[in-house]
Image: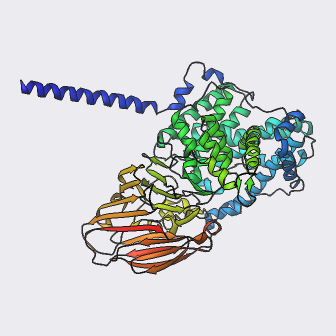
Amino acid sequence: MQNIKLQMRRFFLLLATLVATVISAKAADTDLNIVKAEYSKPGVAESFRTGSHWLPLPDYKDRAGWSKLFGPQSATVVRRGEKYLNYVWKVIPATTYLEFERTGDRIVMEDIYFANTKAIMSLFLAELAEGKGRFTDQLVNGVWQSTQMTSWALSAHQYFQHSKRPLPDEREHLVDIFGGRYGEMMSFIYYFFHNEFDKIDPSISCAMESAIKRNVLDPYLDPNEHFVQFWMGYDPQKMLNNWTPWCTAETMTCFFLMEKDPVRLKAAIDQSIMSVDKFLNYVKKDGACEEGPGYWAVAYGKLYDYLQLMYDVSDGKFNLFDNPRIRKMSEFTSRANIAEDWQVNFADGPARQKAAYQAVWCFGKATGSQEAMKYALASLADTKKGKFDYPEVTTEDAFVAIRDLVSFPEIDARIDSLNSLLSTSSLAAVTASLRKDVPVSTWYPETELCFMRNASHWFLGAKGGFNNESHNHNDVGSFVLFIGNTPVLIDAGKGTYTKQTFISKERYKIWQNQSQWHNVPVINGGGQLYGAKYKSSNAFCDTKKGVFSLEMQNAYSDTSKCTYLKRTYKFPAKGKPSLTIIDDYKISFRKAPDVEHFLVNGEVEIREGYLVIHCANGLNVRLEYPKSLMATCETKELTDPIFTGVWGSDIKRISLTSKGDAPLKGTYTFFIYSL
């Protein structure tokens, strides 16, 4: 009888497990291919059609409409255009493309490229704003030269071609992140001005159509060109990143503005859905951007552009903005903001960067996130002027510029209201009120990012993850610590991109990409390595208790002989603010010392058993360390303008080194508090 009961209990346990597994699998399935699922709903696919009916903008000749749209922006936009009335259009020589291959310098080509695109955008917007034809001839000059370019891709990206060379290869047509943007710009100009251009000479519009078709539309649809468009997702060996939503959004803008063949348009839509679904299936479901907040605007921000485009063209029939996962993505950059323009800068992100307020506002409004919208407003606070700035129409991105014109009236009205509060409240107080609803802590369990705040305005950002994230640094287990708006323990970030940056065997020779230049230990002489298998395990976070822990041994090289390395962060929300870091380790045999590294933006005073870090704004912080470790500090001189613009002339690296015969098993504990 007991055996029968035991067998029955086992049967029901097995049945419950199977049911739970099926339910879990079905739940997981709902997170996959969500774009296709939305497009497949009755009546949605039929709502997409050729033509530009979806643009919520007046015709070029509608002066009253444009005057209302530009509003107070009009004078600024016209002045910007006037600067280019006598602009001398720059040709990009072949040797300038080749410079990337010869010296690794990509900037020499890009300076010319972006100078021309800024001129074209400024003239385009100025003519829309003024409408007198004063900018048309010079705009035609820029457009005509653009039509003669066999590719709109950057030299640094041409290595995706079979040739691996920096010169555009006529046998392939790469659509890169800026080539798609160039095509998008040309498509908007064609849409608004082709009738005006035809009055000058129909050859202009004809050349524009041909160039957009050659450089964007045809390569996107041609299966023989898919190898070079790695971002489309046809190659399962290629990792997808921000290029997928970025290029897809821009390419589809070109199709929706230019394509007249419904069969080709349907093929492009289907292809875009496949690509964006593959991107969404690849990135984590928790809403975090693994490329870091520095890439949010061109990753999830561009995902928003694509979803908004699909919404607009379908007249609202296609709508993923009510999806909770999409909403989380819209709020990530708000959670990753530390103070003012400081942000968590894991991976290739700058520590200091103005928020992409247009994308944040629009994405937040679309998903119904007041948090995101208020963060966009807060980012417009100008501490030097003592007020909130009004946004300006961008000259970098035609789609965003058009979106700006539609969204700015509402943003301007909100800025009016905020500035009116400054007669009775400080800018800091009004800004704080916009941020009061941001959660104290956020844990992204799949991406393994942890953001914690306390009542004393301390901020801890820590990560797990793996060392093959897009734009990766070898930084599993690393962290940043801020007190108020003052950086204490930092991530240096990225420098100017060169050829070396994107060649894996060279990338980790760059100092800021190495684990030795992050806030993680060197164990037994070994640091972390690059690759998907070098990752954390058993990551755990209790945001209420202020605890984040992870095991890091799998992120380290075999030479470390590290069998166990658990890091624990203790960051209490109440009481005297402090941060405790505990590293528990085991190694199989000792051959070299351990070294705990901490990067600092400030001066370091070494004392017995503790350090005093003299930070900006008169802040002094004490870091207590085990007496078994010896403290040294070195200065890293900075010359790259990206670094000096954030950190000044140098940063410091604290090294806390064990004895050469340190135990095979032990614990290093660090206690940090302000003085």
Q: Residue shown at 9%/24% (left/top)?
A: 4
Q: Residue shown at 82%/38% (left/top)?
A: 69
Q: Residue shown at 67%/37% (left/top)?
A: 217
In the visual, does 116 lie left or right of 375? right
In the visual, does 408 lie left or right of 462? right
Residue 213 position by quadrant: top right
Q: Position of residue 562 (x, y in %)?
A: 30, 64
Viewer-closest of 348 and 205: 348
Q: Position of residue 320 (x, y in %)?
A: 57, 31
596 vs 334: above or below: below
Q: Position of residue 392 (x, y in %)?
A: 77, 49
Q: Residue shown at 41%/49% (left/top)?
A: 544
Count of numbered labels shown in the rendering: 0
Residue 522, visible in the rendered structure: no
In the visual, does 430 lie left or right of 59? left
Viewer-closest of 374 and 105: 374
Q: Position of residue 277 (x, y in %)?
A: 52, 36
Quadrant of the image for the N terminus? top left
Viewer-closest of 515 and 507: 515
